[in-house]
Image: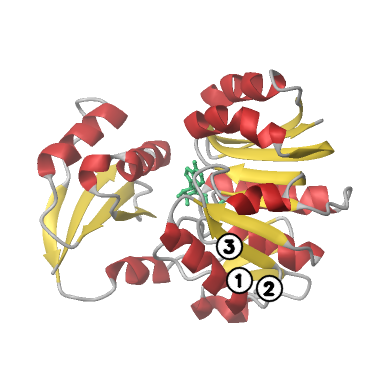
Amino acid sequence: MTLIASLNLAKESDAIRLIEAIGEDDDLGYPSAATTEQADQSWTVDVYFEDAPDEVALARVVAQALGPDAGAFTVAELPDEDWVAKSLEGLKPVRAGRFLVHGSHDRDRIQPGDIAIEIEAGEAFGTGHHGTTAGCLEEIDRLGKIHDYKSILDLGTGTGVLAIAIAKAWEKPVLATDIDPIATRVTAENAALNGVGDKIEAATAEGFGNPVMAARAPFDLVVANILAGPLIALAPEIVQHLAPQATVVLSGLLVAQGPGVTAAYEAEGMKLVRQGEQEGWLTLTLER
Ligand SMILES: C[S@@+](CC[C@H](N)C(=O)[O-])C[C@H]1O[C@@H](n2cnc3c(N)ncnc32)[C@H](O)[C@@H]1O
């Protein structure tokens, strides 16, 4: 039995904030969730549960993320189907720089000159629809035109979308790591699907807690689309694993969190050289 908890919100930024909060809440058991724009330009957050959800925890997460007046989830039963994948089937392909991130149902939308990345939405984060992923893809496309990186780490790889973008665009090997073993499995599958299985090594690690990190360091490019808190906590270790001349691309932070994250990396000797905003999310580029 699959249950769907739905809440309609006026603003996309609230829907994004809520989905992030749901993804971080231990009591909810890290359920799959999706946001969908409605015809009236409101946004629905759908959360999928295999068993009856903890409705007290759901209400608490809504109130903490959006305040006491944000409304309440309604829970309904769905017939058995892969509802996460189904809800995402309708997603349109996303363009970011030269990259086109698309599902298998949109292969015919690939144009000459596109660097196509096929990602089946479902078990891990990173379909290109989130402003953080799109911001990183645009920055990767830009950086590839002015740098020739040799040792590359995608920290918090999710579906592997950024690692696949790098491997396809630059024909370079990438180490792709994630704290979540499902994400690293999905990354290996997606890398093979996209013809770059030989270029991407997927490894499970919290931060740098896997010997493969030391073995593959020093890195001259690190991309990390995580969240502001972990990015700040990881600043010393990320910088310790860098080559003398290196670039770090950070995303997963809201505009208001930019100064705090930048300060953590400046304290480690990095310099902010660029920042871009997509849908309220920042992508920072730092160098040393
Ligand atoms: C926002 S998703 C980004 C996915 C993909 N890189 C993208 O840009 O769409 C963040 C990913 O970081 C992973 N993550 C969170 N904290 C981490 C940590 N301390 N070490 C490694 N991975 C982490 C999560 O499991 C999740 O898959």
Which structural element holds mark 2?
loop
Q: Earlier in the sequence, mark 2 or mark 1?
A: 1
Do callouts 2 and 1 mark residues in contact (Cβ within 8 Å)? yes
In the image, which is nearer the foreground, mark 3 or mark 1?
A: 3
Mark 3 — residue?
Answer: 202
Tags 3 and 1 touching, CB below 8 Å: yes
C-alpha gap between disc 3 and disc 1 = 9 Å
Q: Quick one: label 2 or label 3, which is nearer the N terminus?
A: 2
Tell me: residue 25, above or below residue 85.
Answer: above
* Whole-number angstrom distance, CA of label 2 to CA of label 3: 12 Å
Disc 3 within 8 angstroms of ligand 1 (CB): no
214 or 231, nearer to the observer: 214
- Total label count? 3
Q: Which residue is mark 1?
A: 191
The residue under the point 46% across, 55% down is 125
Amino acid type, callout 2: Val
Quadrant of the snapshot with the N terminus: bottom left
For label 1, the SS is helix
Measuring 71% from the left and 74% from the top, which residue is drawn there? 111
Residue 244, label in figure: none
* Residue on which the image places disc 2: 196
Vertical order, 200 against 251 (above or below)? below
Q: Amino acid at mark 1?
A: Ala
Residue placed most toward the observer, 236 or 27: 236
Q: Position of residue 192 (x, y in %)?
A: 60, 77
